Amino acid sequence: MPLGNDTLAKLREIVGADHVLTTKEDLIPYSFDGTAALQQMPGAVAFAGTTEQVAAILKLANQHKLPVVTRGSGTGLSGGSLPVNDGLVLCLVKMDKVLELDRANLTMLVEAGVTTLTISDAASAAGLFYPPDPGSMKISTIGGNVAENSGGLRGLKYGITRNYVMGLEVVLPEGEICWMGNKCVKDVAGYSLRDLFIGSEGTLGVITKVLLRLIPKPQAKKTMVATYAAMDQAAQTVSDIIAAQIIPCTLEFLDRTTIRCVEDFAKVGLPLDCEALLLMETDGHPAAVAEEAAKMEELARQNGAKEVRVAKDDVEANKLATARRSAFSALARVAPTTILEDATVPRSELAKMIRFVDTVGKKYNLKVGTFGHMGDGNLHPTFLTDERNKEEMHRVEEAFQEIFDEAIRLGGTITGEHGIGLAKKGILPKFAGDAQMRVLRALRRTMDPNGILNPGKMFE
Amino acid sequence: MPSHQSHLKNLDYSVVQQCMHCGLCLPTCPTYDATKLERNSPRGRIALMRAIADDRLEVTRTFGDEMYFCLGCLACMTACPAGVNYAELFEHARAEVEEQRLLDSPKRRLIRWFTVKWLFMDLRRLLLVGRAMRLYQQMGFQTLLRRSGVLKLLPKRLQELEAMTPDIPKEFSAEMIPPVTRAVGERKYRVAVLTGCAQDLIFSEINRDTVEVLAHNGCEVITPPEQQCCGSLHAHNGELGLATELARQNIDQFPPEQFDAIISNAGGCGSHLKHYSKLLADDPRYCERAELWDRKLKDVHEWLAQIGVKAPARDGQPPLKVTYHESCHLSHGQKVVTQPRQILKLIPNLTLVELPEANWCCGSAGIYNLVQPEMAGQLLDRKLKHIRSTGATIVANGNSGCLLQLINGVRQAGLPVRVAHPMTLLAEAYRRSAAPN
Ligand SMILES: Cc1cc2nc3c(=O)[nH]c(=O)nc-3n(C[C@H](O)[C@H](O)[C@H](O)COP(=O)(O)OP(=O)(O)OC[C@H]3O[C@@H](n4cnc5c(N)ncnc54)[C@H](O)[C@@H]3O)c2cc1C
Ligand code: SF4
Ligand code: SF4
């Protein structure tokens, strides 16, 4: 049901009139997220300031069967926070307090709207480390990170968001407030519901607080950039590094098109005359770092690296990582619409997958820029196109279909970190299979009997 | 359908479409930071502009207000990996708002007519007003009036404005600087210095210092006495036609072929001056020269760093702690970031302490502090807090609008901090080293 005036009045009562937006000019900026070519106008946007307000809003929504889409910073790449037409957007960016940093237990308790960068900085200021660092970290919210189970540049060694969530405060779809998890390293009481919410894409409840695990800050790190005349050489370097039993914290890859765009923006002195670039970082005990870095450099050279540049200090290392984080947005310099893919394969199949993407791009005559987390097999081939060119958009879709099929054939997945949302809803059933789909549906119906949370997303 | 031309619809669609809504600009936008509303963010504003270009939204009053709530600080352009030309979008959006007279009110019309259309269209008028203000201050009227309490009768906004009226210097540039200044030593370059309009009125010493510094570095400096405004005020306030007219006049007055460089010492002006070719792209008589003009146009710090600026000799001055506030249009608009710092570090007795959030807008933003006092005040407080935290006794900055804002800020806060242009500090150091010890 669309939003009526009485519902709006009640919303204003709950959060205050200043925190409810209804004019067209206020709503248009919430009609999309970070995903290309998706747009839908909400009926209203409400900002919650407390868990209790979230609970009251969900109760109200249940009464009126009003669709609610939870939103963090709207950087999602699968359409997860795209509004439902005329529905409510519940935005959590004003719940942005760091509530506690517990040095004895190495945990941090934050509200869901805190940005990833704030968390990372707060941990660092206390001499601790919060590793997950999605490319969007300076603006993405922890609520969004948990809901998408986001990865980042350090996934290879440190894992993803899931590995750092110890507890969650969640408002269930019918308005009940529920804590799951705690500060204990061990806890096997009942099903791990907390884990169910990680990656739930706003369909099972609204996350309002997150208890995070922190780790000691590595004492040393070394960052390097290796450049190659051929993609295969970069892929082989990655395989060799892992075969040598080194797990660096970062093994990121950029192809020629991406390198040019990134350099054009970040001006960090990346060489423009190469086909592939690897950004490598190792961290830990200074002695181990020195040894691993030397070995990685040697392997890079053995595989034909044209140049291996070692960052001289933290400032340069950070610049290189920041440049890499800008890759996706920087690709938009070349074309009006950038559609990126998130297919992921086991590490051992990576070189094959890269070659396949290349062939598919040529077959459908599409411009592609590829970058990604090479160490964990998570590639982001990005099609550089124009959404107004219907014919080309059709070719993009066909190309994607082939890429998904190949990823599945190689034992991979249709999305490594961006989620299903709307973008991959159509292919989830085929990938997940009947049994999984049945359980997924049953779970969701049980949790959200009125189907108010993010309806139409992930699966029907 | 309205009969006028739509600036946003006529704009090359690729400029409007360039934003891929990744949100990476949000944390650097001062207005978004203050409100956390997407509408007040670059991504949100661009979405509104695009909605207009796509006929999904009319140009409404709310849209107009939003375009004037934006500071035009261009921090979003530095942050944007996708290369969105926000400056261009923003100017066209404001032009659209002006064309439709959406924000029209007698008071606004008067202010805009007086500043944008009359005062800043002709330097002579500006100087005339400046002379009147100088007289007003010199003859003690200002002190008298301020003391008398008569000013309290004015509406609050006007009172605040009166308190902000800058101190008008004793002499204007033309009275201090000869039209041609010979290079000290061998002449290596011939440059022109744009003495600006507001700059000339309020900070003529900075112009003199700039000329002196350039001469000291082997430049013969040309500064014609009667110059025009660069047009940035007009372009940023939706008067692209007037801005184009001023661009032509400036190119005529400073034929770019005749100089090695045309120098600006105000970040805000320079940022606009470097893009005359965009304004004149459709003018066959001017387009080529405008391109040459853009290439020759240099911020003074940029130029000095390029030609290799001379370090002043050591002198017996006590050590000074200086911090540097980046003007938005110098850093985000022109990407001149390291050069002013390099130059400051050359001054022997000076230590440069980094200002936290050095490139965050101070709230001056052209005439923003006049029209959006609340937001401007918040930004100024934030800036002053950081300045205080550095413990510096001098804050250096390369743009007249910011200098004014900071001078007013430190005065009101009672901070014992001097506000100065890097050229002034450098000129002083040269003078000290030239003076016999
Ligand atoms: C330039 C760029 C780089 C990126 N790099 C990476 C990367 O390296 N790795 C990666 O994994 N992702 C990446 N992303 C994707 C995206 O940033 C992440 O998915 C991020 O976690 C989304 O956070 P958000 O706050 O913007 O969430 P939103 O986009 O607002 O929401 C995402 C989903 O989470 C739900 N949600 C949000 N908050 C809550 C909450 N409090 N409770 C319940 N559900 C909620 C929404 O309903 C939606 O389904 C990138 C995106 C961009 C634009
Ligand atoms: S302006 Fe640039 S940084 Fe901001 S959302 Fe658009 S593309 Fe991203
Ligand atoms: S110009 Fe400044 S205030 Fe305006 S959108 Fe960009 S960052 Fe925000």
Image: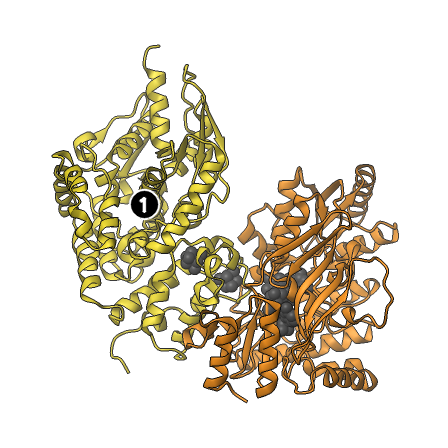
Q: Is residue A361 left or right of residue B370?
A: right
Compared to residue A353, the image places residue B298 above or below, namely above
> Residue A413, position in %: x, y?
77, 72
Above or below, A126 relative to B394: below
Position of residue B194 measured from the top left corner of the image (x, y, whole percent): 26, 41
Assign the C terminus of chain A to one quadrant of the image.
bottom right
**Colouring convention used in this rendered image of the protein:** by chain
Quarter residue A363 falls in:
bottom right
Between A336 and B99, the one nearer to me in the picture: B99
Check the rendered structure and report the hue given to chain B: yellow
Please name whichever residue, A121 or B118, is drawn nearer the observer in this view of the structure.
Answer: A121
Q: Is residue A280 left or right of residue B122?
A: right
Chain that is coloured orange in the picture: A
Front position in the image: A57 or A131:
A57
Mark 1: few/some/many CA within 10 Å (<14, 14-19, 20+): many
Front position in the image: B73 or A335: B73
> Would you name the residue on which mark 1 appears?
B401
Chain letter of mark 1 equals B
Q: CB at mark 1 closer than 8 A to ligand 3?
A: no
* The quadrant where residue B68 appears: bottom left
- Tell me the amino acid under the disc marked 1: Gly
Residue at point 43% right, 40% down?
B325
